[in-house]
């Protein structure tokens, strides 16, 4: 019962934390691999595994940042040095960033939409698992998640897309919650009176 109470409390209080507010240390290699295994256990109609992971940690975060910054500069020739430097540190703000790559494709039985939803479920499982380990998270995309030049250099094929960059770290300060939607605004109860005779 205590475990269930803790789990429900986690679900009720989970919130995103901006990467620039995260501090280290991040997950150990063993914790990181455990997170990836947990995230891989989500619903996957047809057992297609229509997603995969790219791990950015250590100096690799800055190498990826140079790719992002170079592309940004090519798109914005008048960008200031501060703007380019900011782009260089996009993936270095958190100790660990895991990209969830959606690789949905036409299938005779499984709609692509369901495959994409599966990748979204991976992102959700990854964030909750990290939160359960005591880390804070942010599920982001940002502009470079949609730039094919950047994605190609990250190793994505033409039919692959980023479902999310999951930033993982520790809270530098206690995060505050934000307003959540009222159930009356988002819940519709279908009843027997809707039956059509």
Image (tube, rainbow, N blue to C red):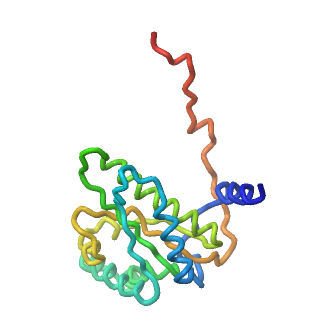
The residue shown at (30%, 61%) is: 103
When the figure is inspected, residue 118 is found, relative to residue 86, above or below; the finding is above
Position in image of residue 51 (x %, y %): 36, 63
The answer to which image quadrant residue 143 occupies is: bottom left
Q: Residue furthest front?
A: 47
Q: How many numbered marks does the figure carry?
A: 0
Residue 54: image quadrant is: bottom left
The residue sitting at 34% across, 67% down in the picture is 145
Left or right of residue 134: residue 108: left
Residue 130, percent from left and from top: 58, 69
Decide which of 75, 36 is in the foreground and name it. Answer: 36
Instruction: Return the x and y of residue 177 as percentages of the image width and height.
Output: 66, 60
Which of the two residues, 82 or 114, is positioned nearer the viewer here?
114
Please state, as top left, top right, bottom left or bottom right, where the C terminus lies in the image: top left
98 shown above or below 86: above
Considering every residue shown, the one lying at the far top of the view is 197
List x then y, in percent, for residue 77: 25, 79
Q: The N terminus appears in which quarter of the rendering?
A: bottom right
As drawn, the residue found furthest toward the bottom would be 59
Residue at the farthest left position: 158
In the image, what residue occupies the spot 31% across and 82% down? 67
- Residue 88 horizontal side relative to residue 19, left or right: left
Up-down relation of residue 86 to residue 105 (above or below): below
């Amino acid at each position: 019962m205590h475990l269930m109470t803790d789990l429900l409390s986690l679900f009720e209080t989970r919130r995103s934390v901006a990467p620039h507010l995260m501090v280290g240390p991040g997950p150990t290699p063993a914790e990181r691999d455990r997170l990836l295994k947990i995230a891989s256990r989500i619903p996957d109609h047809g057992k297609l595994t229509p997603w995969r992971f790219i791990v950015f940690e250590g100096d690799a975060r800055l190498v990826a940042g140079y790719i992002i910054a170079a592309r940004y500069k090519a798109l914005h020739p008048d960008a200031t040095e501060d703007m380019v430097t900011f782009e260089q540190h996009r993936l270095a703000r958190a100790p660990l960033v895991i990209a969830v790559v959606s690789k949905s494709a036409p299938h005779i039985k499984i709609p692509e939409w369901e495959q994409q939803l599966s990748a979204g479920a991976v992102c959700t499982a990854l964030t909750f698992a990290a939160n359960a380990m005591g880390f804070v998270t942010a599920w982001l995309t940002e502009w470079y998640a949609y730039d094919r030049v950047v994605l190609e250099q990250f190793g994505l094929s033409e039919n692959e897309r980023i479902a999310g960059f999951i930033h993982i770290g520790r809270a530098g300060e206690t995060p505050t919650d934000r307003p959540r939607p009222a159930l009356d605004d988002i819940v519709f109860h279908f009843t027997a009176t809707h039956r059509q005779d």
